[in-house]
Image: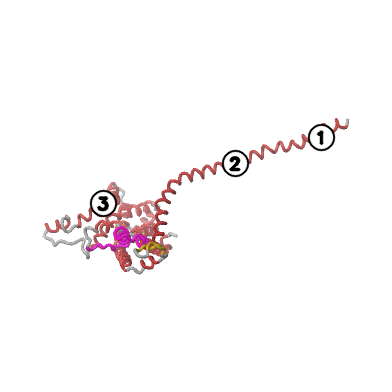
Amino acid sequence: MTLLRQGPTAGAGAANTSAPVGRNIPAVDGSAGQRLRRLSGRTRHKAMGLLLVTPFTLLFLAFLVAPLGYAFWLSLRTSTLVGGDHFSWFTNYKQAFTDTQFLSGVRRVIVFGLVQIPIMLGLALLGALIIDEVTSRLAKVFRMTLFMPYAVPAVIGALMWGFLYSPTFGPVNSLAGALGMEKVDLLGHSLMLTSLGNIVTWQWTGYNMIVLYAALQGLPREVYEAARMDGASRVQTAWRIKIPMISSAIVLTLMFTIIGTLQFFTEPRVLEPTASSVITPDYTPNLYAYNLAFQYSEFNYSAAISFSLGAVVFIGSYLFLFATRKRSGLK
């Protein structure tokens, strides 16, 4: 009898104790399931993002990181007929920064940039301000006309200007002779940098103009209307409002132009066969590195010259950004 009475009691107790546990299980399973679903969703998003950037990452590693690493490894070695190929640490870099040919090329591109960059960016800024004021179809034609030289590959543009500059069969000197004027040697020592500057200005003014014009288009028009109501002319509005408000875009284009000028290569390389007496193998630092590698087979020293030029470009860009960071708003 006792066993019979204890049986149901024990069973009821067991049922009572198991009931709350049974009621809590679905809640625990539901929250855990939600967390698992959220975790799986995030994992899927991360996996999809990694899958999408994988092709770029592989190409970046294969065609930029790996060549740079190999070139830096070459720059730390020296290969001679007597001593063979051996590890020389930074000997090539010490030689590079005392190499008169490398340093003269750096000085030449700096002088070239001090004259050409202000002219090119001044024309680009002037063109951007003009087409920002004009809203007719003429502005679209003007914009496309100035941008068109940028669409021409640099090699083709240099070849075209080399034909125009030619002292023997170029149309410029032919026209001068037909008009009874004295012929001008545009590929001579005195005018070579001017001729190269004309090519670069022709090709890159439109690109910089479009960048500055896009920055002008992002400015609020209410500022112009307020200036006009205060009696400001269009020139005053451009000088005191538009130009200061796009200073960050101007600094950005200026920085990219400085970097491109220090890496000047394509135009001198194309014109080198035409004016070999003027454009020497060390005319620019990049041209010097190219000729060292592919004409004299000095691959180790050529790699050191390239990385030395990269250091000059990096230091120059950093100093420029540091000097203009307050005015431009770039950090």
| Amino acid type at image mark 2 | Leu
| Amino acid type at image mark 1 | Ala
Is residue 301 one of those drawn in magenta? yes
Write down the region rendered in magenta.
Answer: 277-303
The answer to which of 313 and 212 lies nearer the viewer is 313
Locate residue 266: give its quadrant.
Answer: bottom left
Q: Which quadrant does the C terminus fall into?
A: bottom left
In the displayed structure, 107 sits above or below 253; it is below
Locate residue 245: give its quadrant.
Answer: bottom left
- Please state if 198 lies on the left or on the right of 236 as rendered: left
- Please state if 30 lies on the left or on the right of 222 as rendered: right
Query: How many other residues sit within 10 Å of disc 2, few (<14), some (14-19) or many (≥20)?
Result: few
Q: Residue at x 33, y 52 (%)?
A: 210
Q: SS class of the residue under badge 2?
A: helix
Judging by the rendered image, the residue that carries numbered circle 3 is 156
Which circle's residue, 2 or 3, is located before the other in the chain? 2
Judging by the rendered image, the residue that carries numbered circle 2 is 36
Query: How many other residues sit within 10 Å of disc 1, few (<14), some (14-19) or many (≥20)?
Result: few
Circles 2 and 1, Cβ within 8 Å, touching? The answer is no
Query: How many other residues sit within 10 Å of disc 3, few (<14), some (14-19) or many (≥20)?
Result: few
Judging by the rendered image, the residue that carries numbered circle 1 is 10
Residue 279's x, y, as percent? 25, 62
Circles 1 and 3, Cβ within 8 Å, touching? The answer is no
Which circle's residue, 1 or 3, is located before the other in the chain? 1
